[in-house]
Amino acid sequence: MCSISFISLIFSSFLSYLVGIIFIMNDYSIFIEWEVVSMNSLSIVMTLLFDWMSLIFMSFVLLISSLVIFYSKEYMESDYKINRFIMLVLMFVASMMLLIISPNLISILLGWDGLGLVSYCLVIYFQNIKSYNAGMLTALSNRIGDVALLLAIAWMLNYGSWNYVFYLEIMKSDLEMMVVGSLVVLAAMTKSAQIPFSSWLPAAMAAPTPVSALVHSSTLVTAGVYLLIRFNILLSSFWISDFLLLVSGLTMFMAGLGANYEFDLKKIIALSTLSQLGLMMSILSMGYYKLAFFHLLTHALFKALLFMCAGAIIHNMNNSQDIRLMGSLSLMMPLTSSCFNVANLALCGMPFLAGFYSKDMILEVVSLSNINMFSFFLYFFSTGLTVCYSFRLVYYSMTGGSNFSSLNMLNDEGWIMLKSMLGLLVMSIFGGSMLSWLIFPTPVVVVLPYYLKLLTLFVCLIGGLTGYMISNVSLFFYNTALNNYSFSYFLGSMWFMPVISTYGIINYPLMMGNLVVKSFDQGWSEYFGGQRLYYSLVKNSQLNQMLQNNSLKIYLLSFILWILILFVFMIWF
Protein backbone atom coordinates (compact mmCIF):
# COMPACT_ATOMS: atom_id res chain seq x y z
CA MET A 1 0.00 0.00 0.00
CA CYS A 2 2.94 2.35 0.75
CA SER A 3 4.34 2.02 -2.77
CA ILE A 4 0.98 2.59 -4.54
CA SER A 5 0.23 5.66 -2.37
CA PHE A 6 3.74 7.05 -2.94
CA ILE A 7 3.60 6.70 -6.75
CA SER A 8 0.08 8.12 -7.09
CA LEU A 9 0.79 11.08 -4.76
CA ILE A 10 4.10 12.05 -6.38
CA PHE A 11 2.53 11.84 -9.86
CA SER A 12 -0.35 14.09 -8.70
CA SER A 13 2.20 16.49 -7.20
CA PHE A 14 4.14 16.94 -10.45
CA LEU A 15 0.91 17.32 -12.45
CA SER A 16 -0.43 19.94 -10.01
CA TYR A 17 2.89 21.84 -10.11
CA LEU A 18 2.97 21.95 -13.94
CA VAL A 19 -0.64 23.17 -14.14
CA GLY A 20 0.18 25.75 -11.41
CA ILE A 21 3.09 27.10 -13.50
CA ILE A 22 0.78 27.43 -16.54
CA PHE A 23 -1.81 29.26 -14.42
CA ILE A 24 0.73 31.65 -12.88
CA MET A 25 2.24 32.46 -16.31
CA ASN A 26 -1.16 33.22 -17.87
CA ASP A 27 -2.75 34.75 -14.73
CA TYR A 28 -5.49 32.16 -15.05
CA SER A 29 -7.91 30.54 -12.59
CA ILE A 30 -10.80 28.07 -12.83
CA PHE A 31 -13.95 28.20 -10.70
CA ILE A 32 -15.93 24.95 -10.84
CA GLU A 33 -19.52 24.59 -9.62
CA TRP A 34 -20.98 21.10 -9.35
CA GLU A 35 -24.70 20.87 -8.56
CA VAL A 36 -24.98 17.84 -6.27
CA VAL A 37 -28.74 17.96 -5.54
CA SER A 38 -31.55 20.02 -7.07
CA MET A 39 -35.07 19.74 -5.62
CA ASN A 40 -37.72 22.40 -6.36
CA SER A 41 -36.05 25.67 -5.33
CA LEU A 42 -33.29 23.97 -3.31
CA SER A 43 -29.90 23.36 -4.91
CA ILE A 44 -26.83 22.04 -3.13
CA VAL A 45 -23.72 23.14 -5.05
CA MET A 46 -20.11 22.04 -4.51
CA THR A 47 -17.62 24.73 -5.55
CA LEU A 48 -13.91 24.34 -6.26
CA LEU A 49 -11.34 27.04 -6.98
CA PHE A 50 -8.18 26.21 -8.94
CA ASP A 51 -5.70 29.08 -9.19
CA TRP A 52 -1.89 29.31 -9.04
CA MET A 53 -1.88 29.54 -5.24
CA SER A 54 -4.06 26.48 -4.56
CA LEU A 55 -2.33 24.36 -7.25
CA ILE A 56 1.24 25.11 -6.12
CA PHE A 57 0.35 24.58 -2.46
CA MET A 58 -1.38 21.31 -3.37
CA SER A 59 1.70 20.13 -5.26
CA PHE A 60 3.91 20.82 -2.22
CA VAL A 61 1.53 19.05 0.19
CA LEU A 62 1.33 16.04 -2.16
CA LEU A 63 5.13 15.93 -2.61
CA ILE A 64 5.83 16.01 1.14
CA SER A 65 3.05 13.50 1.95
CA SER A 66 4.32 11.08 -0.74
CA LEU A 67 7.85 11.20 0.71
CA VAL A 68 6.48 10.85 4.25
CA ILE A 69 4.51 7.72 3.25
CA PHE A 70 7.63 6.29 1.56
CA TYR A 71 9.64 7.12 4.70
CA SER A 72 6.99 5.42 6.89
CA LYS A 73 7.51 2.14 5.03
CA GLU A 74 10.76 1.68 6.96
CA TYR A 75 10.10 3.83 10.04
CA MET A 76 6.82 2.04 10.88
CA GLU A 77 7.86 -1.43 9.65
CA SER A 78 7.43 -2.98 13.11
CA ASP A 79 3.78 -1.85 13.19
CA TYR A 80 1.45 -4.71 12.22
CA LYS A 81 -1.31 -2.22 11.33
CA ILE A 82 0.79 -0.08 8.98
CA ASN A 83 -2.03 0.00 6.39
CA ARG A 84 -4.28 1.64 8.98
CA PHE A 85 -1.58 4.27 9.55
CA ILE A 86 -1.24 4.92 5.79
CA MET A 87 -5.04 5.25 5.47
CA LEU A 88 -5.09 7.83 8.27
CA VAL A 89 -2.32 9.83 6.57
CA LEU A 90 -4.20 9.69 3.23
CA MET A 91 -7.41 10.88 4.95
CA PHE A 92 -5.37 13.72 6.46
CA VAL A 93 -4.03 14.72 3.03
CA ALA A 94 -7.53 14.49 1.48
CA SER A 95 -8.91 16.86 4.18
CA MET A 96 -6.11 19.33 3.43
CA MET A 97 -6.80 19.13 -0.33
CA LEU A 98 -10.48 19.95 0.30
CA LEU A 99 -9.50 22.94 2.43
CA ILE A 100 -7.02 24.25 -0.17
CA ILE A 101 -9.37 24.21 -3.18
CA SER A 102 -12.51 25.45 -1.37
CA PRO A 103 -13.76 29.00 -1.97
CA ASN A 104 -16.79 28.14 0.16
CA LEU A 105 -16.95 28.29 3.96
CA ILE A 106 -19.03 25.10 4.24
CA SER A 107 -16.56 22.92 2.32
CA ILE A 108 -13.69 24.66 4.17
CA LEU A 109 -15.33 23.54 7.43
CA LEU A 110 -15.49 19.94 6.14
CA GLY A 111 -11.74 19.98 5.42
CA TRP A 112 -11.02 21.89 8.64
CA ASP A 113 -12.92 19.41 10.82
CA GLY A 114 -11.44 16.49 8.87
CA LEU A 115 -7.96 17.77 9.80
CA GLY A 116 -8.97 18.10 13.45
CA LEU A 117 -10.48 14.62 13.68
CA VAL A 118 -7.69 12.77 11.86
CA SER A 119 -4.99 14.71 13.75
CA TYR A 120 -6.57 13.48 17.01
CA CYS A 121 -6.47 9.88 15.73
CA LEU A 122 -2.80 10.29 14.74
CA VAL A 123 -1.71 11.96 17.99
CA ILE A 124 -3.17 9.07 20.03
CA TYR A 125 -1.73 6.48 17.60
CA PHE A 126 0.77 5.22 20.20
CA GLN A 127 -1.79 4.33 22.82
CA ASN A 128 -0.59 5.53 26.22
CA ILE A 129 -1.64 8.11 28.81
CA LYS A 130 0.70 10.81 27.49
CA SER A 131 -0.67 10.42 23.96
CA TYR A 132 -4.28 10.51 25.17
CA ASN A 133 -3.66 13.71 27.14
CA ALA A 134 -1.89 15.33 24.17
CA GLY A 135 -4.69 14.25 21.83
CA MET A 136 -7.36 15.70 24.12
CA LEU A 137 -5.47 19.00 24.42
CA THR A 138 -5.10 19.14 20.59
CA ALA A 139 -8.76 18.32 19.96
CA LEU A 140 -10.19 20.74 22.56
CA SER A 141 -7.90 23.62 21.50
CA ASN A 142 -8.93 23.19 17.87
CA ARG A 143 -12.64 23.01 18.77
CA ILE A 144 -12.52 26.73 19.63
CA GLY A 145 -11.51 27.47 16.04
CA ASP A 146 -14.18 25.13 14.68
CA VAL A 147 -16.88 26.97 16.66
CA ALA A 148 -15.54 30.34 15.39
CA LEU A 149 -15.77 29.05 11.81
CA LEU A 150 -19.36 27.85 12.41
CA LEU A 151 -20.28 31.31 13.71
CA ALA A 152 -18.64 32.90 10.65
CA ILE A 153 -20.77 30.61 8.44
CA ALA A 154 -23.91 31.74 10.30
CA TRP A 155 -22.95 35.41 9.87
CA MET A 156 -22.23 34.96 6.15
CA LEU A 157 -25.95 34.18 5.69
CA ASN A 158 -26.43 37.97 5.74
CA TYR A 159 -24.79 38.06 2.32
CA GLY A 160 -26.84 35.31 0.65
CA SER A 161 -23.98 32.92 -0.11
CA TRP A 162 -21.06 31.21 1.57
CA ASN A 163 -18.70 31.70 -1.37
CA TYR A 164 -16.51 34.30 0.31
CA VAL A 165 -14.49 34.93 -2.90
CA PHE A 166 -17.46 36.91 -4.26
CA TYR A 167 -17.42 39.29 -1.30
CA LEU A 168 -13.70 40.07 -1.06
CA GLU A 169 -14.14 43.57 -2.51
CA ILE A 170 -17.11 44.35 -0.22
CA MET A 171 -15.01 43.25 2.77
CA LYS A 172 -12.79 46.33 2.45
CA SER A 173 -15.54 48.80 3.37
CA ASP A 174 -18.31 46.78 5.05
CA LEU A 175 -18.26 47.02 8.85
CA GLU A 176 -20.45 43.91 9.18
CA MET A 177 -17.69 41.90 7.59
CA MET A 178 -15.48 42.77 10.59
CA VAL A 179 -17.40 40.16 12.61
CA VAL A 180 -16.64 37.47 9.99
CA GLY A 181 -13.03 38.69 9.86
CA SER A 182 -12.61 38.48 13.64
CA LEU A 183 -14.04 34.94 13.72
CA VAL A 184 -11.85 33.77 10.84
CA VAL A 185 -8.77 35.24 12.57
CA LEU A 186 -9.73 33.43 15.82
CA ALA A 187 -10.11 30.15 13.89
CA ALA A 188 -6.73 30.67 12.19
CA MET A 189 -5.07 31.49 15.52
CA THR A 190 -6.22 28.19 17.08
CA LYS A 191 -5.16 26.07 14.09
CA SER A 192 -1.81 27.83 13.70
CA ALA A 193 -1.22 27.75 17.49
CA GLN A 194 -0.76 31.46 18.16
CA ILE A 195 -0.81 32.79 21.74
CA PRO A 196 -2.86 31.82 23.82
CA PHE A 197 -3.49 28.54 21.95
CA SER A 198 0.18 27.55 21.57
CA SER A 199 0.42 24.73 24.08
CA TRP A 200 -1.14 22.03 21.88
CA LEU A 201 1.58 22.18 19.19
CA PRO A 202 4.52 20.78 21.24
CA ALA A 203 2.07 18.33 22.90
CA ALA A 204 1.14 16.96 19.45
CA MET A 205 4.71 15.59 19.23
CA ALA A 206 3.27 12.44 20.83
CA ALA A 207 2.34 11.38 17.28
CA PRO A 208 4.74 9.19 15.22
CA THR A 209 7.60 11.19 13.65
CA PRO A 210 6.40 10.79 10.01
CA VAL A 211 3.10 12.37 11.10
CA SER A 212 5.02 15.23 12.76
CA ALA A 213 6.91 15.76 9.50
CA LEU A 214 3.64 16.10 7.61
CA VAL A 215 1.53 17.92 10.22
CA HIS A 216 4.12 20.51 11.24
CA SER A 217 5.38 21.37 7.79
CA SER A 218 2.58 21.67 5.27
CA THR A 219 -0.82 20.53 6.56
CA LEU A 220 -2.49 21.06 9.93
CA VAL A 221 -0.65 24.09 11.34
CA THR A 222 -0.44 25.87 7.98
CA ALA A 223 -4.23 25.59 7.44
CA GLY A 224 -4.80 28.70 9.57
CA VAL A 225 -2.16 30.73 7.71
CA TYR A 226 -3.57 29.60 4.33
CA LEU A 227 -7.12 30.60 5.36
CA LEU A 228 -5.89 34.08 6.33
CA ILE A 229 -3.96 34.36 3.03
CA ARG A 230 -7.29 33.77 1.27
CA PHE A 231 -9.01 36.36 3.52
CA ASN A 232 -6.04 38.78 3.29
CA ILE A 233 -8.20 41.77 2.25
CA LEU A 234 -10.01 41.59 5.61
CA LEU A 235 -6.76 42.06 7.52
CA SER A 236 -5.88 45.36 5.87
CA SER A 237 -9.23 46.97 6.66
CA PHE A 238 -9.77 46.94 10.43
CA TRP A 239 -7.98 46.84 13.79
CA ILE A 240 -7.51 43.06 13.37
CA SER A 241 -4.14 43.51 11.64
CA ASP A 242 -2.61 45.42 14.59
CA PHE A 243 -3.86 42.80 17.06
CA LEU A 244 -2.56 39.93 14.89
CA LEU A 245 0.84 41.62 14.47
CA LEU A 246 1.28 41.88 18.25
CA VAL A 247 0.09 38.32 19.01
CA SER A 248 2.13 36.67 16.25
CA GLY A 249 5.24 38.67 17.17
CA LEU A 250 4.95 37.53 20.79
CA THR A 251 4.37 33.92 19.63
CA MET A 252 7.55 34.08 17.56
CA PHE A 253 9.52 35.51 20.51
CA MET A 254 8.07 33.07 23.07
CA ALA A 255 8.75 29.99 20.90
CA GLY A 256 12.34 31.11 20.19
CA LEU A 257 13.05 31.57 23.91
CA GLY A 258 11.41 28.27 24.84
CA ALA A 259 13.42 26.29 22.27
CA ASN A 260 16.68 27.47 23.88
CA TYR A 261 15.64 25.83 27.18
CA GLU A 262 14.32 22.58 25.68
CA PHE A 263 16.19 19.25 25.55
CA ASP A 264 13.66 17.11 23.68
CA LEU A 265 14.74 16.90 20.01
CA LYS A 266 11.20 16.81 18.58
CA LYS A 267 9.94 19.58 20.86
CA ILE A 268 12.79 21.89 19.79
CA ILE A 269 11.75 21.41 16.15
CA ALA A 270 8.06 21.88 17.13
CA LEU A 271 8.86 25.19 18.86
CA SER A 272 10.82 26.16 15.76
CA THR A 273 7.64 25.53 13.71
CA LEU A 274 5.71 27.73 16.14
CA SER A 275 8.28 30.50 15.71
CA GLN A 276 8.03 30.31 11.89
CA LEU A 277 4.22 30.33 12.06
CA GLY A 278 4.47 33.53 14.08
CA LEU A 279 6.71 35.00 11.36
CA MET A 280 4.20 34.06 8.62
CA MET A 281 1.27 35.49 10.58
CA SER A 282 3.07 38.73 11.39
CA ILE A 283 4.13 39.47 7.80
CA LEU A 284 0.60 38.53 6.69
CA SER A 285 -0.90 41.01 9.17
CA MET A 286 1.22 43.74 7.55
CA GLY A 287 -0.49 43.02 4.22
CA TYR A 288 2.26 41.07 2.39
CA TYR A 289 0.25 37.91 1.70
CA LYS A 290 2.47 36.74 -1.20
CA LEU A 291 5.53 36.87 1.05
CA ALA A 292 3.70 34.89 3.74
CA PHE A 293 2.73 32.27 1.13
CA PHE A 294 6.31 32.15 -0.17
CA HIS A 295 7.68 31.49 3.32
CA LEU A 296 4.91 28.94 3.93
CA LEU A 297 6.16 26.88 0.98
CA THR A 298 9.90 27.14 1.64
CA HIS A 299 9.38 26.41 5.35
CA ALA A 300 7.39 23.26 4.49
CA LEU A 301 10.39 21.84 2.61
CA PHE A 302 13.14 22.23 5.18
CA LYS A 303 10.88 21.56 8.20
CA ALA A 304 9.71 18.22 6.77
CA LEU A 305 13.37 17.32 6.13
CA LEU A 306 14.29 18.36 9.68
CA PHE A 307 11.62 16.09 11.18
CA MET A 308 12.61 13.18 8.93
CA CYS A 309 16.26 13.48 10.02
CA ALA A 310 15.14 13.72 13.67
CA GLY A 311 13.07 10.56 13.14
CA ALA A 312 16.06 8.69 11.69
CA ILE A 313 18.21 9.77 14.67
CA ILE A 314 15.53 8.78 17.22
CA HIS A 315 15.06 5.46 15.39
CA ASN A 316 18.79 4.73 15.66
CA MET A 317 19.01 5.79 19.31
CA ASN A 318 16.43 3.28 20.53
CA ASN A 319 13.67 5.91 20.70
CA SER A 320 15.61 8.33 22.91
CA GLN A 321 14.83 11.98 22.15
CA ASP A 322 17.08 13.73 24.71
CA ILE A 323 19.78 15.78 22.92
CA ARG A 324 22.02 15.55 26.00
CA LEU A 325 22.44 11.82 25.30
CA MET A 326 23.51 12.47 21.70
CA GLY A 327 26.88 13.53 20.36
CA SER A 328 29.29 12.83 17.50
CA LEU A 329 26.39 11.84 15.23
CA SER A 330 28.25 13.42 12.31
CA LEU A 331 30.84 10.61 12.55
CA MET A 332 28.38 7.75 12.93
CA MET A 333 25.53 8.92 10.68
CA PRO A 334 27.23 11.20 8.12
CA LEU A 335 24.49 11.26 5.46
CA THR A 336 21.64 11.85 7.92
CA SER A 337 23.76 14.51 9.68
CA SER A 338 24.41 16.29 6.37
CA CYS A 339 20.69 16.44 5.60
CA PHE A 340 19.99 17.61 9.16
CA ASN A 341 22.58 20.39 8.95
CA VAL A 342 21.38 21.60 5.54
CA ALA A 343 17.79 21.77 6.88
CA ASN A 344 19.03 23.63 9.98
CA LEU A 345 20.98 26.14 7.89
CA ALA A 346 17.94 26.66 5.63
CA LEU A 347 15.91 27.38 8.79
CA CYS A 348 18.52 29.93 9.92
CA GLY A 349 18.40 31.69 6.53
CA MET A 350 21.84 30.66 5.24
CA PRO A 351 22.37 32.51 1.93
CA PHE A 352 21.12 30.70 -1.18
CA LEU A 353 19.33 27.88 0.65
CA ALA A 354 15.50 27.70 0.59
CA GLY A 355 14.86 29.64 3.80
CA PHE A 356 17.13 32.55 2.86
CA TYR A 357 15.00 33.78 -0.06
CA SER A 358 11.84 34.13 2.00
CA LYS A 359 13.25 35.12 5.43
CA ASP A 360 15.69 37.70 4.10
CA MET A 361 13.00 39.33 1.96
CA ILE A 362 10.57 39.37 4.90
CA LEU A 363 13.10 41.07 7.20
CA GLU A 364 14.09 43.61 4.52
CA VAL A 365 10.43 44.46 3.87
CA VAL A 366 9.94 44.86 7.66
CA SER A 367 12.93 47.26 7.74
CA LEU A 368 11.32 49.22 4.90
CA SER A 369 7.84 49.29 6.48
CA ASN A 370 6.46 51.85 8.88
CA ILE A 371 6.07 49.70 12.03
CA ASN A 372 6.69 50.46 15.68
CA MET A 373 9.96 49.77 17.49
CA PHE A 374 8.53 46.91 19.59
CA SER A 375 7.41 44.86 16.55
CA PHE A 376 10.73 45.62 14.83
CA PHE A 377 12.60 44.31 17.89
CA LEU A 378 10.44 41.15 18.02
CA TYR A 379 11.15 40.37 14.36
CA PHE A 380 14.92 40.66 14.56
CA PHE A 381 15.44 39.31 18.07
CA SER A 382 13.31 36.24 17.25
CA THR A 383 15.42 35.64 14.11
CA GLY A 384 18.54 35.75 16.30
CA LEU A 385 16.93 33.23 18.69
CA THR A 386 16.18 30.90 15.74
CA VAL A 387 19.86 30.78 14.80
CA CYS A 388 20.76 30.45 18.49
CA TYR A 389 18.73 27.29 19.16
CA SER A 390 19.69 25.81 15.76
CA PHE A 391 23.41 26.08 16.58
CA ARG A 392 22.76 24.79 20.11
CA LEU A 393 21.01 21.75 18.61
CA VAL A 394 23.90 21.08 16.21
CA TYR A 395 26.44 21.48 19.03
CA TYR A 396 24.69 18.95 21.29
CA SER A 397 23.88 16.34 18.63
CA MET A 398 26.76 16.52 16.12
CA THR A 399 29.93 17.44 18.03
CA GLY A 400 31.81 16.06 21.03
CA GLY A 401 31.72 12.47 22.21
CA SER A 402 28.76 10.11 22.25
CA ASN A 403 26.85 10.17 25.55
CA PHE A 404 24.66 7.19 24.75
CA SER A 405 25.09 3.58 25.90
CA SER A 406 28.06 1.79 24.34
CA LEU A 407 25.87 -1.17 23.29
CA ASN A 408 24.11 0.95 20.71
CA MET A 409 24.89 0.74 16.99
CA LEU A 410 24.45 3.96 15.02
CA ASN A 411 24.57 3.84 11.24
CA ASP A 412 23.07 5.16 8.01
CA GLU A 413 21.61 1.82 6.92
CA GLY A 414 17.97 2.92 6.51
CA TRP A 415 18.05 3.36 2.73
CA ILE A 416 14.31 3.90 2.29
CA MET A 417 14.36 6.68 4.89
CA LEU A 418 17.51 8.15 3.31
CA LYS A 419 16.00 8.20 -0.19
CA SER A 420 12.98 10.19 1.02
CA MET A 421 15.27 12.57 2.93
CA LEU A 422 17.52 13.11 -0.10
CA GLY A 423 14.45 14.03 -2.19
CA LEU A 424 13.63 16.80 0.27
CA LEU A 425 17.31 17.78 0.57
CA VAL A 426 17.34 18.77 -3.12
CA MET A 427 14.16 20.81 -2.63
CA SER A 428 15.56 22.47 0.52
CA ILE A 429 18.56 23.69 -1.49
CA PHE A 430 16.91 24.70 -4.78
CA GLY A 431 13.26 25.23 -3.72
CA GLY A 432 13.71 28.82 -2.53
CA SER A 433 15.25 30.20 -5.71
CA MET A 434 12.82 28.23 -7.90
CA LEU A 435 9.78 29.63 -6.03
CA SER A 436 11.30 33.11 -5.93
CA TRP A 437 11.49 33.19 -9.75
CA LEU A 438 7.94 31.85 -10.02
CA ILE A 439 6.08 33.98 -7.46
CA PHE A 440 8.12 37.18 -8.01
CA PRO A 441 9.03 37.15 -11.73
CA THR A 442 10.10 40.81 -11.46
CA PRO A 443 13.04 41.02 -9.02
CA VAL A 444 12.07 42.75 -5.78
CA VAL A 445 14.59 45.48 -5.02
CA VAL A 446 14.55 46.72 -1.42
CA VAL A 447 16.64 49.87 -1.02
CA LEU A 448 17.82 50.37 2.58
CA PRO A 449 20.63 52.19 4.40
CA TYR A 450 23.89 50.21 4.59
CA TYR A 451 23.67 49.24 8.30
CA LEU A 452 19.97 48.34 8.08
CA LYS A 453 20.68 46.17 5.05
CA LEU A 454 23.39 44.28 6.96
CA LEU A 455 21.28 44.01 10.13
CA THR A 456 19.73 40.66 9.09
CA LEU A 457 23.15 39.08 8.52
CA PHE A 458 24.52 40.62 11.71
CA VAL A 459 21.60 39.33 13.83
CA CYS A 460 22.07 35.81 12.39
CA LEU A 461 25.81 35.82 13.16
CA ILE A 462 25.31 37.11 16.71
CA GLY A 463 22.51 34.54 17.28
CA GLY A 464 24.70 31.66 16.07
CA LEU A 465 27.63 32.81 18.19
CA THR A 466 25.38 33.11 21.27
CA GLY A 467 24.02 29.58 20.70
CA TYR A 468 27.54 28.18 20.46
CA MET A 469 28.73 30.10 23.54
CA ILE A 470 25.74 29.00 25.67
CA SER A 471 26.33 25.35 24.72
CA ASN A 472 30.10 25.49 25.09
CA VAL A 473 30.08 27.04 28.54
CA SER A 474 27.00 25.03 29.50
CA LEU A 475 28.05 24.61 33.15
CA PHE A 476 27.97 28.36 33.73
CA PHE A 477 24.67 28.59 31.84
CA TYR A 478 23.13 25.76 33.90
CA ASN A 479 24.24 27.33 37.18
CA THR A 480 22.75 30.67 36.15
CA ALA A 481 19.53 28.92 35.07
CA LEU A 482 19.30 26.99 38.35
CA ASN A 483 19.99 30.09 40.45
CA ASN A 484 17.07 31.78 38.67
CA TYR A 485 14.96 28.62 38.49
CA SER A 486 11.53 30.29 38.52
CA PHE A 487 12.46 32.62 35.65
CA SER A 488 14.07 29.75 33.68
CA TYR A 489 11.00 27.57 34.22
CA PHE A 490 8.77 30.43 33.06
CA LEU A 491 10.74 30.85 29.81
CA GLY A 492 11.22 27.13 29.19
CA SER A 493 7.57 26.22 29.75
CA MET A 494 6.23 28.60 27.08
CA TRP A 495 5.27 31.23 29.68
CA PHE A 496 3.24 28.65 31.73
CA MET A 497 0.88 28.17 28.78
CA PRO A 498 0.61 24.34 28.95
CA VAL A 499 -0.25 24.55 32.67
CA ILE A 500 -2.86 27.27 32.09
CA SER A 501 -4.32 25.38 29.11
CA THR A 502 -4.61 22.02 30.86
CA TYR A 503 -5.51 23.01 34.43
CA GLY A 504 -7.04 26.43 33.92
CA ILE A 505 -8.84 26.28 30.59
CA ILE A 506 -9.62 22.56 30.23
CA ASN A 507 -9.57 20.93 33.68
CA TYR A 508 -11.73 23.33 35.74
CA PRO A 509 -14.41 23.96 33.08
CA LEU A 510 -14.71 20.18 32.56
CA MET A 511 -15.06 19.62 36.33
CA MET A 512 -17.63 22.42 36.52
CA GLY A 513 -19.48 20.92 33.55
CA ASN A 514 -19.54 17.55 35.30
CA LEU A 515 -20.97 19.22 38.43
CA VAL A 516 -23.65 21.03 36.39
CA VAL A 517 -24.63 17.78 34.64
CA LYS A 518 -24.93 15.92 37.95
CA SER A 519 -26.83 18.75 39.68
CA PHE A 520 -29.14 19.91 36.91
CA ASP A 521 -29.32 17.57 33.89
CA GLN A 522 -29.22 14.39 35.99
CA GLY A 523 -30.55 16.03 39.16
CA TRP A 524 -33.38 18.51 39.79
CA SER A 525 -34.29 19.17 36.17
CA GLU A 526 -34.43 15.42 35.54
CA TYR A 527 -36.56 14.82 38.66
CA PHE A 528 -39.07 17.60 37.89
CA GLY A 529 -38.78 17.33 34.11
CA GLY A 530 -38.54 14.28 31.90
CA GLN A 531 -38.51 11.62 34.60
CA ARG A 532 -41.47 13.12 36.53
CA LEU A 533 -43.49 13.34 33.30
CA TYR A 534 -42.59 9.71 32.54
CA TYR A 535 -43.65 8.47 36.00
CA SER A 536 -46.93 10.47 35.87
CA LEU A 537 -47.79 9.01 32.47
CA VAL A 538 -46.95 5.47 33.68
CA LYS A 539 -49.15 5.80 36.81
CA ASN A 540 -52.08 7.33 34.88
CA SER A 541 -51.77 4.65 32.20
CA GLN A 542 -51.87 1.92 34.84
CA LEU A 543 -54.98 3.48 36.42
CA ASN A 544 -56.59 3.80 33.01
CA GLN A 545 -55.75 0.16 32.23
CA MET A 546 -57.27 -0.96 35.53
CA LEU A 547 -60.47 0.94 34.81
CA GLN A 548 -60.72 -0.69 31.39
CA ASN A 549 -60.55 -4.25 32.80
CA ASN A 550 -64.45 -4.39 33.03
CA SER A 551 -64.34 -5.57 36.67
CA LEU A 552 -67.78 -5.25 38.36
CA LYS A 553 -66.16 -4.51 41.73
CA ILE A 554 -64.32 -1.51 40.30
CA TYR A 555 -67.44 -0.15 38.63
CA LEU A 556 -69.45 -0.52 41.89
CA LEU A 557 -66.66 1.09 43.88
CA SER A 558 -66.36 4.02 41.48
CA PHE A 559 -70.20 4.43 41.40
CA ILE A 560 -70.35 4.61 45.22
CA LEU A 561 -67.41 7.06 45.21
CA TRP A 562 -69.17 9.36 42.73
CA ILE A 563 -72.40 9.30 44.80
CA LEU A 564 -70.44 10.22 47.94
CA ILE A 565 -68.70 13.10 46.16
CA LEU A 566 -72.07 14.36 44.85
CA PHE A 567 -73.63 14.10 48.32
CA VAL A 568 -70.76 16.06 49.94
CA PHE A 569 -71.00 18.68 47.20
CA MET A 570 -74.75 19.17 47.74
CA ILE A 571 -74.37 19.43 51.56
CA TRP A 572 -71.51 21.94 51.22
CA PHE A 573 -73.48 24.29 48.99
Image (tube, rainbow, N blue to C red):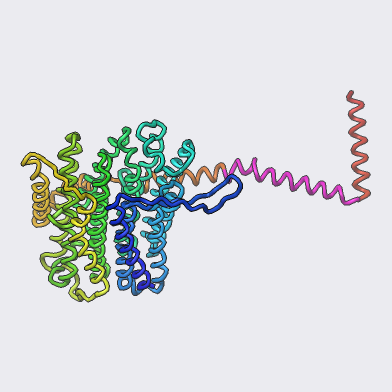
Residue displayed at 29% across by 45% down: 496
Q: Is residue 20 left or right of residue 114?
A: left
Q: Position of residue 42 (x, y in %)?
A: 57, 46
Q: Is residue 500 visible?
A: no
Find residue 248 and report its image quarter.
top left
In depth, the one of 283 and 329 nearer the eye is 283
Residue displayed at 13% across by 56% down: 352
Q: Position of residue 99 (x, y in %)?
A: 39, 52
Q: Position of residue 275 (x, y in %)?
A: 24, 49
Residue displayed at 91% across by 50% down: 551
The N terminus, quarter of image: bottom left
- Name the magenta segment's main secondary structure: helix
Q: From what the image shows, is residue 573 above or below residue 135?
A: above
Q: From what the image shows, is residue 87 above or below residue 472?
A: below
Q: Is residue 134 visible?
A: yes
Does the magenta run of residues contain 332? no
- Which region shows up in magenta? 521-550
Instruction: Name the outermost residue toward the left.
Output: 450
Q: Is residue 539 left or right of residue 273?
A: right
Q: Is residue 66 left or right of residue 156?
A: left
Q: Position of residue 453 (x, y in %)?
A: 9, 43
Residue displayed at 13% across by 55% down: 350
